[in-house]
């Protein structure tokens, strides 16, 4: 199906982007495939006509042009959203238009699950191709580590089955390689039994708990000598323009049927101004996270990775307060500084699946890490430059603070990267060179480097930058 400019199908696609910046672009038309043959034909036409195009799954990326394009073609995969579950082999086959909420509802009914996104309306494709952090990470590694098979359509229009044994080089590259190699049209995950578990969202007022306490308990959690593999947390230092106040928001999940586990006692044994902690299934927790997002507003992400310490976490919070102060009255501003642990138990699980290491280049020997995210939403596009400047300043200042503390790590998590960051380069020179070789093998004409926008590219046009250049030229 092809939806022409301003037709109902065209407008439906523009209305399904998460943030307003993405919806503001106007493609020439929208292609809505429902099978591999549709995608194959579309790719051949686009390649032969040298037409620029974008790929859209769930449409949740915040980077302008990440999954939409001005005056080009959008391949919108949302209608191709089948989910097939084989309970005998514990495998789940998911087409690229599916969202995590649809997957979880089907799996919850069978008391099964897979590691995946934590927000209901995030798309399966984008999150999985960027690596993916889940509540099950300490037990299962990155989300992409749990993918057994891909179906991908490369620029020639050929449809490939990709596994650890078939096209094994491409199998490695797709686990964090974004849209650099083709259109992935099927993901086959390994599932495992999972019933209800405990978790939810808490809020702590700075009138009752101070910053030092929250930084201390998070650092203790992230650096635990014995890390509880069932415990997952997202800590946010939250600014809401409507409330004119900062607060701590802790999103906790304990993926066993156990209430108030010891791993979270320091977070729950304080006065909470809000709590939704309870036993529930994954689809309910994912739905709760969607309610707390500002869909349809302007939005921005930026990220860096650090080694956690209470001193550094506290300094970054101070930097955050200084950056937010000049923009705090921007209409509708919600600014979240978020910390998420990447413990060695997670990277160890990943290494079991990828004995030679994955594309990220992160090993257990790197120690416990924390992925830092600033997630921002606001109402008016006239404030876009102001907020973007503030985001850049924050990343610069926080990176310098981490370097002074000898706690900076070069990894830039692709799913949280701003358009002006370079997550691919952060994978390290050797891995990037290997990815470029794989790209040249499966996409010799460079269709997914030169015609397909979004997703952060490999820099194939100049391999020389890999020789002796810094991993992070932008920082």
Image: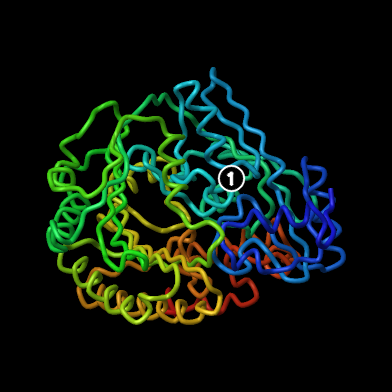
Give the secondary structure at mark 1.
Answer: helix
In the image, residue 141 sits, relative to residue 91, either above or below, namely below
Across and down, in percent, residue 245 comes to: 27, 66
Q: Can residue 21 be seen in this view?
A: yes
Q: Which of 382 and 343 is in front in this view?
A: 382
Q: Residues within 10 Å of mark 1 (few under 14, many from 20)?
A: few
In the image, residue 232 sits, relative to residue 6, either above or below, namely above
Across and down, in percent, residue 28 comes to: 81, 66
Q: Can residue 429 be seen in this view?
A: no
Across and down, in percent, residue 226 comes to: 17, 42
Q: Quadrant of the C terminus?
A: bottom left
In the image, residue 141 sits, relative to residue 366, either above or below, namely above
Q: Nearer the viewer, residue 425 or 97?
A: 97
Across and down, in percent, residue 332 comes to: 44, 67
Location of residue 139 (image quadrant): top left
Q: Name the residue beneath numbered marker 1.
A: 168
In the image, residue 276 sits, relative to residue 367, either above or below, namely above
Q: Nearer the viewer, residue 166 or 84?
A: 84
Residue depicted at x 45% and y 47% = 291
Residue depicted at x 80% and y 49% = 40
């Amino acid at each position: 199906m092809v939806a022409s400019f301003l037709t109902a199908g065209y407008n439906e696609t523009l209305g399904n982007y998460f943030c307003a910046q993405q919806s503001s672009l106007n493609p020439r038309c929208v292609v809505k495939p429902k099978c591999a043959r549709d995608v194959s034909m579309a790719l051949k036409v686009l390649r032969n006509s040298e037409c620029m195009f974008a790929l859209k799954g769930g449409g949740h990326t915040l980077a302008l042009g990440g999954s939409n394009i001005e005056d080009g073609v959008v391949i919108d995969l949302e209608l191709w959203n089948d989910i097939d579950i084989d309970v005998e082999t514990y495998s789940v086959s998911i087409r690229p238009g599916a969202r995590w909420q649809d997957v979880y509802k089907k799996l919850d009914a069978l008391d099964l699950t897979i590691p995946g996104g934590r927000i209901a309306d995030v798309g399966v494709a984008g999150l999985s191709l960027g690596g993916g952090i889940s509540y099950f990470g300490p037990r299962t590694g990155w989300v992409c580590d749990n993918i057994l098979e891909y179906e991908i359509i490369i620029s020639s229009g050929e449809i490939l089955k990709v596994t650890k044994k078939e096209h094994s080089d491409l199998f490695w590259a797709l686990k964090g390689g974004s849209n650099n190699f083709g259109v992935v049209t099927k993901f086959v995950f390994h599932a495992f039994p999972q019933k209800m578990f405990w978790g939810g969202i808490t809020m702590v007022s700075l009138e009752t708990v101070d910053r030092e306490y929250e930084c201390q308990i998070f650092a203790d959690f992230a650096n635990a000598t014995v890390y509880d593999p069932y415990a997952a947390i997202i800590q946010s230092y939250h600014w809401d323009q409507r409330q004119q106040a900062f607060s701590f928001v802790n999103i906790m999940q304990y993926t066993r049927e156990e209430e108030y586990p010891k791993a979270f006692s320091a977070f729950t044994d304080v006065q909470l101004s809000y709590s939704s902690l309870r036993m529930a299934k994954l689809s309910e927790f994912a739905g709760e996270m969607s309610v707390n997002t500002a869909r349809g507003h302007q939005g921005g992400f930026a990220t860096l990775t650090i080694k956690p310490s209470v001193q550094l976490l506290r300094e970054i919070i101070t930097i955050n307060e200084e950056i937010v102060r000049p923009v705090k009255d921007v209409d509708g501003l919600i600014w979240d500084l978020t910390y998420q642990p990447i413990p060695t138990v997670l990277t160890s699980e990943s290494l079991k699946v990828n004995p030679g290491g994955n594309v990220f280049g992160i090993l257990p020997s790197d120690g416990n890490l924390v992925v830092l995210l600033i997630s921002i939403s606001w109402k008016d596009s006239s404030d876009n430059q102001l907020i973007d400047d503030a985001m850049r300043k924050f990343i610069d200042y926080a990176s310098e603070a981490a370097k002074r503390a000898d706690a900076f790590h070069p990894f830039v998590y692709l799913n949280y990267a701003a358009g002006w960051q370079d997550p691919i380069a952060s994978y390290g020179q050797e891995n990037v060179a290997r990815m470029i070789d794989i790209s040249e093998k499966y996409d010799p004409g460079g269709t997914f480097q030169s015609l397909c926008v979004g997703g952060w590219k490999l820099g194939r046009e100049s391999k020389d930058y890999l020789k002796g250049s810094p991993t992070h030229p932008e920082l």
